[in-house]
Amino acid sequence: MPVRRATAEDAHGLAVVHVLGWQRAYRGLLPQHVLDDLSIPDREAGWVTILGDPERQARTLVVERDGVIAGWAGYGAARDADGPASGELWGIYAHPQYWSTGVGHELLVAVEDALRAEGHDAAYLWVLEGNERAASFYERHGWLDDGGTRIEERPGLSLRERRQVKALRA
């Protein structure tokens, strides 16, 4: 099934992918209690808010498999004023049962196309330090570590991240 824009009806499916994706991808990278405390209903409420914002809804893509949300991606203008590019991949997750099936690839290609269509010549993303599976996935798609790092503070948690960038035009 092709990649499409998210709708308000997708909030639950997005939340399932979000929570299960974090619990699987970040096991051993984040404290287990943080992963155990993730809540699909809480995340669904967050997605309802996000999808209620026309700009964010328009920049959230989903792909389905077997009638369920198999993955999602969010993108748009760079959120870091001093970033290396004007576009940003805000997040991309696939349901663990769909890892290595092409879902991530489909979403990433669609995001790159959408960023180009919006006039961005380059984009960046942040990947959790130690998440080599994700970093390798992005590298295979031409996203390269540029040495940028940050610590994203969340309640009770500091996420150490490194930046990867990609030129979107030759």
Image (tube, rainbow, N blue to C red):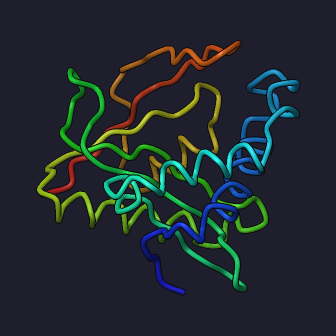
Q: Locate residue 88 relative to residue 8 in the image: left or right.
A: left
Q: Residue 102, position in %: x, y?
A: 58, 72
- Residue at position x 47%, y 49% in the image: 138
Q: Position of residue 17 (x, y in %)?
A: 69, 57
**Which residue: 44% across, 76% down?**
4
Residue 72 rendering spot, x and y as whole percentages: 54, 61
Residue 134 picture quarter = top right
Q: Is residue 12 above or below residue 31?
A: below
Marker count (numbered): 0
Q: Residue at x 45, y 47 (%)?
A: 139
Which corner quadrant of the image does residue 58 belong to? bottom left
Q: Quadrant of the C terminus?
A: bottom left
Please state if 106 lies on the left or on the right of 27 as rendered.
left
Q: Nearer the viewer, residue 162 or 111?
A: 111
Q: Is residue 128 above or below residue 56?
A: above
* Rendered residue at 30%/49% (across/down): 76
Q: Quadrant of residue 99?
A: bottom right
Where in the figure is residue 100, as x and y percent of width and height? 67, 65
Q: Quadrant of the N terminus?
A: bottom right
Left or right of 26, for residue 11: left
Q: Is residue 166 left or right of residue 39?
A: left
